[in-house]
Structure formats: C-alpha cells, structure tokens
Image: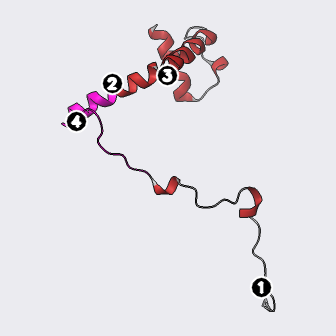
Amino acid sequence: MREIVNGIMYTLRSGCAWRLLPHDFPKWNNVYYYFWRFRKEGLWKRIHDILRGHLREQEGREVSPSAAIIDSQSVKTTDKKGFAVTMPAKRSRGANVILL
C-alpha cells in the first residue's frame, strides 16, 4: 500500500499522466484506482484535516481555525467574457488623432 501512495504522490507532484507512471511503481491502473477510491471515500480530506490539526497544535493554536479570509482578488469583477475584454478601444466621435 505504501508503494501505491508513493505512486499517487509522484503523479500528483510531477503532473505526469497516470499511464506514464514509471515502472518502479505498481501498475498505473492500480495506483489510479486507489487514488479515486480514496477520493470518493473522503480519505484525502480526513488526512488533510488531521495533519492541519497537528500542525496547529504544534504552533500553539486551536485545532480548528476560528476565522477565514476571502481573497478579494479572486472575485470576478465583470460579466464580460471572451473577446469583449480584448477588443480595441473605440474612437470617440469628433476626435481627430494626428500621428507624428
């Protein structure tokens, strides 16, 4: 099972396709099966929550966070999509532009 987890971590860290998993690991389809099984069962979330709790305890804080921060930069500020954003600016009427 340790080799399965190592294969999962290798694939996630390197970004390679499952089928390109090196032959040092178990067969790619076995590694892929367990990755999705763990995901479906919520195992990755449980591992994350446990590790976060241990880290917070080591830092002298409460196990569960008491507040959250929302990054305003990630909020969309426009409804325009596609090429509308990249269209060139329109000239205003009556404006004469002289290029030197």
Q: Is residue 30 above or below residue 92?
A: above
The mark lying in front, picked from 3 and 1, is: 1
Q: Nearer the viewer, residue 22 or 34?
A: 34
Q: Which residues are magenta?
A: 50-70
**Magenta highlight on residue 60:** yes
Q: Amino acid at mark 3?
A: Met
Q: CA distance from mark 1 to mark 2?
A: 60 Å
Q: Which residue is mark 3?
A: 9
**25 in magenta:** no
Residue 11 % position (x, y): 56, 23
Residue at image x 55%, y 28%? Answer: 14
The image shows residue 27, relative to residue 84, as above or below, that is above
Task: Say which residue appears at 58% left-offset and 61% top-offset.
Answer: 77
* Amino acid type shown at disc 4: Glu
The front one of 15 and 62 is 62
Q: Are marks 4 and 3 in contact (CB under 8 Å)?
A: no
From the image, tell me which residue sits under label 4.
Answer: 62
Q: Identity of the amino acid at label 2?
A: Ile
The mark nearer the N terminus, 4 or 1, is: 4
Q: Are marks 2 and 4 in contact (CB under 8 Å)?
A: no
Could you say whether the residue bearing mark 4 is in a helix, strand or loop?
A: loop
Mark 2 — residue?
Answer: 50
Amino acid at dot 1: Ser
Q: Name the front one of labels 2 and 3.
A: 2
Label 3 Cα neighbours within 10 Å, binned few <14 / some 14-19 / many ≥20: some
